[in-house]
Image (cartoon, rainbow, N blue to C red):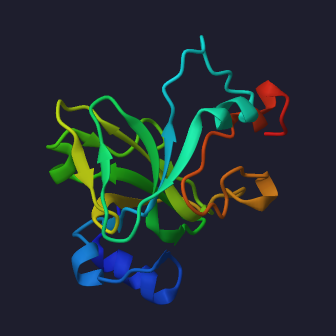
């Protein structure tokens, strides 16, 4: 069951679901979703002549990423073909009986901006800001203004609360993240990590 605006408001009021700050609930809460705003921090991937990036090497991944913080009142220009990591302004806390789906806003989709390549959900128990995988699939650069509504979350109720929710007990890599986070796939078991 997907939560309606009534369900979302009730859970927010009860503290069962947290979206903070939710500065303009009348604007941000849609009929079956909540709009989230774009933060000021971005991780940009440098163009490089290396043959490939090895996902298991977090140090190697970090070598090709630079952080950009957009000054107050400025914009971030996303060029055609670019892929950057952004973040939401809002921090969320998803309860054990919900899963949240990260979706793009149709108005930006019509400008060829997508907000996730593949990481389109927040597991039950997830807490933190949401890293956005921003791409420009169009032919023209698009100016993104920090603070603009960039994505939306929909919430689906599980048939029962998750027995092992995302979080510290699982050693979850991105729990309590602040700002955009580069890949930590090197921590996966298949690359010698614990997960």
Residue 158 seen from this side: no
Would residue 21 be found to the left or right of residue 152 on screen? right
The image quadrant of residue 31 is bottom left
The image quadrant of residue 34 is bottom left
Q: Give 178 or 122, whichever is nearer the viewer.
A: 178
Does 20 sit above or below residue 155? Answer: below
Residue in the image at 31% along x and 63% along y: 74
Does 8 sit above or below residue 159? Answer: below
Residue 96 seen from this side: yes
Q: Give 147 or 114, whichever is nearer the viewer.
A: 147
Residue in the image at 36% along x and 59% along y: 154
Q: Position of residue 25 (x, y in %)?
A: 30, 82
Q: Position of residue 35 (x, y in %)?
A: 31, 66
The N terminus lies in which quarter of the figure? Answer: bottom left
Q: Position of residue 40 (x, y in %)?
A: 43, 63
Q: Give 191 or 2, whichever is nearer the viewer.
A: 191
Does 127 sit above or below residue 194? Answer: below
Given the current orientation, which residue lies at the most extreme top position? 51
The image quadrant of residue 145 is bottom left
């Amino acid at each position: 069951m997907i939560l309606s605006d009534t369900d979302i408001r009730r859970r927010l009021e009860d503290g069962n679901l947290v979206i903070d700050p939710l500065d303009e609930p009348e604007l941000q809460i849609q009929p079956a979703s909540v709009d989230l705003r774009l933060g000021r921090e971005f991780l940009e991937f440098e163009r490089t002549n290396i043959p490939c990036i090895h996902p298991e090497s977090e140090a190697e991944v970090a070598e090709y990423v630079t952080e950009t913080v957009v000054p107050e009142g400025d914009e971030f220009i996303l060029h055609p073909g670019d892929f950057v990591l952004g973040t939401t302004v809002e921090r969320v806390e998803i309860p054990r009986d919900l899963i949240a789906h990260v979706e793009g806003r149709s108005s930006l989709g019509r400008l060829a901006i997508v907000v996730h390549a593949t990481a389109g959900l927040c597991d039950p128990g997830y807490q933190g800001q949401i890293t956005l995988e921003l791409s420009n699939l169009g032919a023209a650069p698009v100016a993104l203004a920090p603070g603009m509504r960039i994505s939306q979350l929909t919430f689906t109720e599980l048939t029962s609360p998750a027995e092992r929710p995302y979080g510290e007990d699982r050693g979850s890599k991105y729990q309590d993240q602040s700002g955009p986070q580069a890949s930590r796939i090197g921590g996966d078991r298949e690359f010698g990590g614990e997960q």
